Amino acid sequence: MLIVVLTSVCPRSSCTFFYAFTEQIQQTEQEIDRRLDKLLDILRDEGYPDVQAFMSIYREAKAVVEQ
């Protein structure tokens, strides 16, 4: 993600808020990445080689249940 700030038009208080907000976005993105990695580990621990394999079996099971 690329964020550009023109500091000449950004009042100091707004810039401080912007940088704090940017930091929060970066932390949230890192948390999402960490959780996605954890989900992949859970799938592998359950015997699925990847998400596509899990989703294929899930869709088949869902179709059976819906019938």
Image (tube, rainbow, N blue to C red):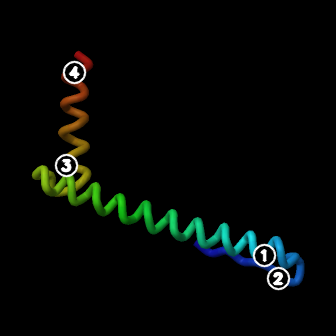
Label 1 or label 3, whichever lies nearer to me, is 1
The answer for how far apart the CA atoms under marks 1 and 4 are is 53 Å
36 relative position to 55: left or right:
right
- Which mark is on residue 44? none
- 2 and 1 marks in contact (CB < 8 Å): yes
The answer for how far apart the CA atoms under marks 2 and 1 are is 7 Å
The answer for how far apart the CA atoms under marks 3 and 4 are is 19 Å
- 3 and 2 marks in contact (CB < 8 Å): no
Image location (x, y in percent) of residue 37 = 30, 63
Q: Amino acid at mark 3?
A: Ala
Q: Amino acid at mark 2?
A: Thr
- First-in-chain label (4 vs 2): 2
Q: Amino acid at mark 1?
A: Cys
Q: Is residue 42 above or below residue 6?
A: above
Q: Quadrant of residue 39?
A: bottom left
The answer for how far apart the CA atoms under marks 3 and 2 are is 48 Å
Quarter of the figure with the C terminus:
top left
Please name the residue that numbered disc 4 is placed on: 65
- First-in-chain label (3 vs 2): 2
Please name the residue that numbered disc 1 is placed on: 15
